[in-house]
Image (tube, rainbow, N blue to C red):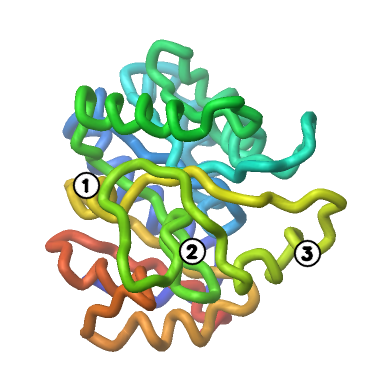
């Protein structure tokens, strides 16, 4: 696990951009797993800026979405889909034939998760997986538990997740999640985990301990040979 302490969000994002661009330059059609949320948003801004300077940049990139909330009211703007579309997919010009996603308002969550697993098996493994970390140590929406699933699946959300951040203020909060499994994540060739924002200090300190515990899913990243942890020092 390579831990990079960066002085601020901008520097953290720039480091992430350099790591990602190096991989894209080597393999222009790599499979990129995009995550929603604030922590990786600076990375996406840097990639969009590069695209503006070099229109052919990422023209072959294949993109798959990490996870999604379920049970939101129809038309809710609190979706991973809207987040990644706005910050990455649309400004990068990722065409629909190079983007695989799951509908937050699907009528068949289980079936859609099986389809996403099929995409991973057909197109994967992931070349780069972008992650954040939950206050309880979840990665994607793989919540703490005695058993963690390997494949893309419908998941129950932990109380600590539902009581955190903007979720608390939603009129109709999510009732479940749909997420890539830890097996999908650990099969990635390279993982970047961004740690920024309030409330992440305790989770980061626990991540530093080289031990594995399914009650702290991020600890499984110690089993992977190529993980870069990018930390905004103001968090720690």
List x then y, in percent, for residue 136: 50, 75
Determine the secondary structure under disc 1.
Answer: loop
Task: Left or right? Give the position of 111 relative to 197.
Answer: left
Determine the secondary structure under disc 2.
Answer: helix
Q: Earlier in the sequence, mark 3 or mark 2?
A: 2
Residue that numbered label 3 is attached to: 168
Residue drawn at 45 percent across, 65 percent down: 143
Per the model, the C-alpha gap separating discs 3 and 2 is 30 Å
List x then y, in percent, for residue 114: 35, 30
- Seen as rendered, the residue at the extreme left is 225
Task: Left or right? Give the position of 15 relative to 184.
Answer: right
Q: Could one spot residue 91 in this view of the protein?
A: no
Residue drawn at 44 percent across, 46 percent down: 179
Residue that numbered label 1 is attached to: 188
Residue that numbered label 2 is attached to: 11
- Seen as rendered, the residue at the extreme right is 171
Location of the N terminus (image quadrant): bottom left
List x then y, in percent, for residue 217: 35, 69
> How many labels were placed on the picture?
3
Residue drawn at 55 percent across, 47 percent down: 36
Q: Earlier in the sequence, mark 1 or mark 2?
A: 2
Q: Earlier in the sequence, mark 1 or mark 3?
A: 3
């Amino acid at each position: 696990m390579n831990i990079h302490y960066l002085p601020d969000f901008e520097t953290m994002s720039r480091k992430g951009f350099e790591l990602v661009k190096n991989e894209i330059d080597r393999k222009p059609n790599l499979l990129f797993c995009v995550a929603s949320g604030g922590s990786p948003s600076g990375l996406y801004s840097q990639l969009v800026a590069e695209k503006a300077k070099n229109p052919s940049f990422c023209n072959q990139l294949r993109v798959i979405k990490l996870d999604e909330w379920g049970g939101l009211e129809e038309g809710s703007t609190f979706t991973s889909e809207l987040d990644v579309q706005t910050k990455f997919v649309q400004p990068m010009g990722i065409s629909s034939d190079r983007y695989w996603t799951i509908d937050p308002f699907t009528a068949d969550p289980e079936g859609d998760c099986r389809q996403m697993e099929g995409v991973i098996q057909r197109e994967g493994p992931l070349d780069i997986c972008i992650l954040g970390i939950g206050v309880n140590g979840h990665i994607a929406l793989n919540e703490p538990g005695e058993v963690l699933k390997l494949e893309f699946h419908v998941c129950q959300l932990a109380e600590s997740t539902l009581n955190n951040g903007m979720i608390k203020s939603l009129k109709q909060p999510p009732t479940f999640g749909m997420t890539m499994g830890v097996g999908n994540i650990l099969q990635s060739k390279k993982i970047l985990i961004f740690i920024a924002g309030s409330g992440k200090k305790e989770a980061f300190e626990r991540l530093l301990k080289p031990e594995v515990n399914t009650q702290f899913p991020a600890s499984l990243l110690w089993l992977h040979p190529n993980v870069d942890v990018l930390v905004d020092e103001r968090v720690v």
